[in-house]
Image: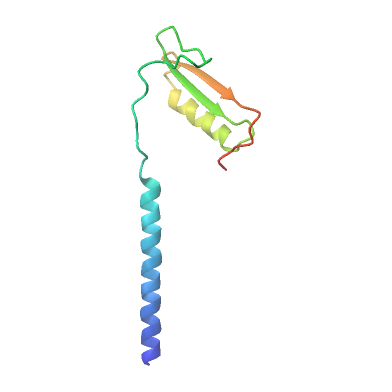
Amino acid sequence: MKTAGTAGLVWTLWGTAVIAGFLALAGYEATPGATSPPPLEWPASTAIPRASNGLATLLLFAHPKCPCTRATLKELAVALEGRATQVDRSVGRRLKTSWCPR
């Protein structure tokens, strides 16, 4: 009987540790990253033009073969809905890289 009690205690401790680990990971995943203020001036060394008509400039760089690009563009469309006249949009593609986060 002592062995059954010990095994039950081990399973209980193991299960508690697993649940605690999942909760810690979920908390970490849901924590936003650090934010920083945008630069006050447009970089002089860039070839990308800034909107000169007083609109905010939004730049999006997307890999054409990345599976998340389509979802990103859909989310961007939702975010900009009703704000089309307030933002100058530009989408850039870089074809010579094989980088993709997924």
Q: Is residue 99 above or below residue 43?
A: below
Q: Residue at x 49, y 31 (%)?
A: 75
Return the residue nearer the eye: 99 or 56.
99
Q: Position of residue 42 (x, y in %)?
A: 42, 15
* Residue sitting farthest toward the top: 53
Q: Position of residue 15 (x, y in %)?
A: 39, 70
Residue 61 located left or right of residue 3: right
Return the residue nearer the eye: 3 or 43.
43
Q: Position of residue 53 (x, y in %)?
A: 43, 6
- Number of marks drawn: 0
Q: Quadrant of the N terminus?
A: bottom left
Q: Position of residue 39 (x, y in %)?
A: 37, 21
Q: Is residue 25 above or below residue 5?
A: above
Image color mode: rainbow
Residue 17 located left or right of residue 96: left
Q: Residue at x 41, y 65 (%)?
A: 18
Q: Residue at x 46, y 11 (%)?
A: 51
* Residue sitting farthest toward the front: 45
* Residue sitting farthest toward the bottom: 1
Q: Quadrant of the C terminus?
A: top right
Residue 60 located left or right of residue 6: right
Return the residue nearer the eye: 96 or 69.
96
Q: Is residue 42 above or below residue 1?
A: above
Rendering quarter of residue 83: top left
Q: Residue at x 35, y 45 (%)?
A: 31
Rendering quarter of residue 70: top right
